[in-house]
Image (cartoon, rainbow, N blue to C red):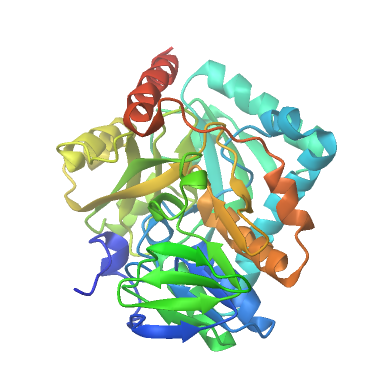
Amino acid sequence: MTAASHVESYYAASTHTAPEHPRVLGAIDCDVCVVGAGLTGTSAALELAGRGYDTAIIEAHRVGWGASGRSGGQTIFGYACEQAKIRKMVGREDDRRLWDMSVEAMTLLKDRIAKYRIDCDYKPGHMHAAVKPRQHRELVDWKRELEDEYGYDSLRMVDRDELASLMATDRYVSGLLDEASGHLHPLNYTLGLNAAAREAGARVYENTPALALEDIGDHILVQTPEGRVRCRFVLLCGNAYLGNLSRRIRAKVMPVGTYVVATERLDEELATSLIRNDMAVADVNFVLDYFRLSADRRMLFGGRVSYSTIPPPSLSHSIRARMVKVYPQLKAVRIEYAWGGNVAITMNRAPHFGRLSGTVFYAQGFSGHGMVMTGLAGKLLAEAVVGSAERLDVFSRIPHHPFPGGRLLRTPALVLAMAYYRIRDLL
């Protein structure tokens, strides 16, 4: 087998040195086999190894190869769907539990960065920005709901004048600032967390895709190209890259491509003027733009989606056009990196966690809000292995439906549905 490397990106070019790990060759035994060495799988392995479970992570490529190491790096509160929507699906009591766990997830991320001294350029502050007055009213209502229903009091409305003092752009009419959210270098965070899991005793195997699961009574065999893993529990943490390992859960998510560019390093005065408080920013369009400054003063700008997961042509050109719409002063700045990757979305945009059996658990469908929730997802999977699945079961009560159209037609059906939201963004 040819050794995989990280996808070329700004993150891969600026990552800390990380060891390469062996493939699974022949037969190995463990208590728990974790499929996927992203944030969910690494988080679960960290928890389990710390409790004394013999834990092996198998990864088809490299640690952090998928969305965990390629995302926009924004660490945002809540879920990808509105909390009111979750309340309608599960009722007020479970809705409150889910909200509280989302806040716990943010605390968990920060605590792990501090505890394990993970060098990942974490910066506090994230703003949801309104492009038009209708969106301003939506942000005001959203803030009021989060305060009244959930007691979340770290949000602050920023009017146009204050926004102009924070950002050198006139695109936005207002913003909702959350100092508890923030941004980081996602690949370095993933690698740092993985190092902590290894220090706790977890074994990591790279270039080892899981091909099939076989129940042999009191154990499960995870087949790989050059061997197999014999274990008592399996945790499926591949998300958009899990493939056909479980058709039951594959139908509940759709891999969607999303894309980011990084500019050349900017002059310090120019970079500081663009976002003076160094926060991350995302507009509130359905097909949104999101951006922030890197630690070495590059503009990292994300946008565009591909429901076929095929990167759009002229990726740098199309995202540059969106970036220049926000910051015309970057028109002459060179794009040095452009990359993309897949996130797994669900029909309702709520996360999809649960179990396939008493010994096989999964977490997927973060729908673009994975940097924070993946950490807690891994912790909940570990709790389920230990024998306390109550919190995982709260998530499993969120109803999820397969995407319509089957394997052949679900992508065209989704493209048609998304056209409506693109039109709405323009109104």
Residue 160 placement (x, y as % from top left): 53, 28
Name the image quarter holding residue 423.
top left
Q: Is residue 131 visible?
A: yes
Q: Residue furthest front?
A: 217
Question: Which quadrant of the figure contains the C terminus?
Answer: top left
Question: Which quadrant of the figure contains the N terminus?
Answer: bottom left
Q: Is residue 379 left or right of residue 314?
A: right
- Viewer-nearest residue: 16 or 65: 65
In this rendering, the answer to whether 309 lies above or below 48 is above
At 29% from the left edge and 49% from the top edge, which residue is drawn? 340
Residue 47 placement (x, y as % from top left): 64, 75
- Viewer-nearest residue: 240 or 142: 240
Q: Residue furthest right?
A: 93
Residue 19 placement (x, y as % from top left): 35, 84
In this rendering, the answer to whether 235 lies above or below 128 is below
Residue 38 placement (x, y as % from top left): 45, 64
Q: Is residue 140 left or right of residue 159?
A: right
Name the image quarter holding residue 150.
top right
